[in-house]
Image: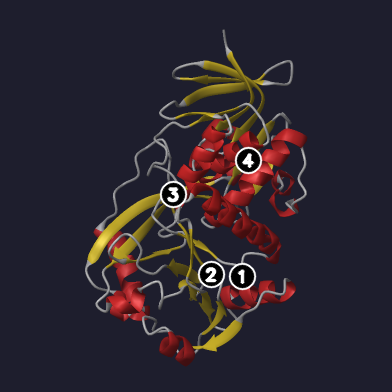
């Protein structure tokens, strides 16, 4: 006999683990399917640390979502006993005309978020690991910090299991279909399952599973670096806020030392390399390393010591860099969470709540108009 569930969730990374946890907590009979381990390093939900920040230069509409995400991360931290959320303060840095600085400031003002404007001298004096140029400024917001992605996934999965969910790793989905009775059938390498509803949160593999959105959810190779600081005390959590930094239209981001012996940073969209997630990502190269190291030498000279680690992951980008949180355009029993464009993990806790809402009732109290598939009607 085919196993039957209320909801099946495909992809148990950051978004999928949160979704199964929220669904299970509501009493839904949930199956979570993951093609790799839980957690794993093949997709978009690894890398030791992920930024969380209240200023949202991407769009002020994200601010209510990130404020709810903070609440949910703290609740999960309390319930799980795991150390998930680290507050370091955060800096959004650029010229006064840059998007990162000006739009971060706008999002703070529209949503009454406390912040300070710091000039370069103040940043460099207060946080001496930084070497910000004189023509740049920073929005400082004291509640910025990072979450620990692998531990967040584990905590969500443990919560889901405690509430009765079934989670199966190393079980790739080979096909799924919407059935005549408006439910779904999912085929894996091991079994066939049926459910009333399906949620697809498979990261870079979503376009493979739902080819209708392949043109608006494009996987990209990303590389991260950890460099051992020459002055380690300057890059400790107590003295080094997380940052987003705009330099001539390019955006970089970084973290204090945590877990790995090095200060971590990366460049959004790295080398703009579109990839096929079914093929193994190429290992970091000397070209990748030098691109990142040249940035560190200029803006964090005390941090540009020996390389400790390089790692690859994937972004899945939409044309406007905003998320996709919506039901399938043809099959309403299928809900899609995709296209997080390199800035999604901080929201995983609330995205799980939203996807659970959409799957169970078809609507949510959260404002997600920015993330509708309708905005891509011509491209789809």
In the image, residue 26 sits, relative to residue 195, either above or below, namely below
Give the mark nearest the N terminus, 4 or 3: 4
Q: Tag 2, which secondary structure?
A: loop
Write the residue at 48% across / 74% down.
245
Q: CA distance from mark 1 to mark 2?
A: 9 Å
Write the residue at 51% across / 46% down.
14
Where in the figure is residue 293, as x and y percent of width and height? Answer: 30, 70
Q: Nearer the viewer, mark 2 or mark 3?
A: 3
Mark 4: few/some/many CA within 10 Å (<14, 14-19, 20+): many
Mark 2: few/some/many CA within 10 Å (<14, 14-19, 20+): many
Q: Nearer the viewer, residue 30 or 135?
A: 30
Residue 36, quarter of picture: top left
Which residue occupies the extreme top position in the image?
1
Q: Which mark is residue 144?
A: 2
Q: Is residue 63 left or right of residue 37?
A: right
Mark 1: few/some/many CA within 10 Å (<14, 14-19, 20+): many
Q: Nearer the viewer, residue 50 or 340?
A: 50
Q: Is residue 341 visible?
A: no
* CB under 8 Å between discs 1 and 2: yes
- Residue linked to disc 3: 151
Residue 222, quarter of picture: bottom left
- Residue linked to disc 4: 22
Q: Nearer the viewer, residue 77 or 205?
A: 77
Q: Nearer the viewer, mark 2 or mark 4?
A: 4
Q: Tag 3, which secondary structure?
A: helix
């Amino acid at each position: 006999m085919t196993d039957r569930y209320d909801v099946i969730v495909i992809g148990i990374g950051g978004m999928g683990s949160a979704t199964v946890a929220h669904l299970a907590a509501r009493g839904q009979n949930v199956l979570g399917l993951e093609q790799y381990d839980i957690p794993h390093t093949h997709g978009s939900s690894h890398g030791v640390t992920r930024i969380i920040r209240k200023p949202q230069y991407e769009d002020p509409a994200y601010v209510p979502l990130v404020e709810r995400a903070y609440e949910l991360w703290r609740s999960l931290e309390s319930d799980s006993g795991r150390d998930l959320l680290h507050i370091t303060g955060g800096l959004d840095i650029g010229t006064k005309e840059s998007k990162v600085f000006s739009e971060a400031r706008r999002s703070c003002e529209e949503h009454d978020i406390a912040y300070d404007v710091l000039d370069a001298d103040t940043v460099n004096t207060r946080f001496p690991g930084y070497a910000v140029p004189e023509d740049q400024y920073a929005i400082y917001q004291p509640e910025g910090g990072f979450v620990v992605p692998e531990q967040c996934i584990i905590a969500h999965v443990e919560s889901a299991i405690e509430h009765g969910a079934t989670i199966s790793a190393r079980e790739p989905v080979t096909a799924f279909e919407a059935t005549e009775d408006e439910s779904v059938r999912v085929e894996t390498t091991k079994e066939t399952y049926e459910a009333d509803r399906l949620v697809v949160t498979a990261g870079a593999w979503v376009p493979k599973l739902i080819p209708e959105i392949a043109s608006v959810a494009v996987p990209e190779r990303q590389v991260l670096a950890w460099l051992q600081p020459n002055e380690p005390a300057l890059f400790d959590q107590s003295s080094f806020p997380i940052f987003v930094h705009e330099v001539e239209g390019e955006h970089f981001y970084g973290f204090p030392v945590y877990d790995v012996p090095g200060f971590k940073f990366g460049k959004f969209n790295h080398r703009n390399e579109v990839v096929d997630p079914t093929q193994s990502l190429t290992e970091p190269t000397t070209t990748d390393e030098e691109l990142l190291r040249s940035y560190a030498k200029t803006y964090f000279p005390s941090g540009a010591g020996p390389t400790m680690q390089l790692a690859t992951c994937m972004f899945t980008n939409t044309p406007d860099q905003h998320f996709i949180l919506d039901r399938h355009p043809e099959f309403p029993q299928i809900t899609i969470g995709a296209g997080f464009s390199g800035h999604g993990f901080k929201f995983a806790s609330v995205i799980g709540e939203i996807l659970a809402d959409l799957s169970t009732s078809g609507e949510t109290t959260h404002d997600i108009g920015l993330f509708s598939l309708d905005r891509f009607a011509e491209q789809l």
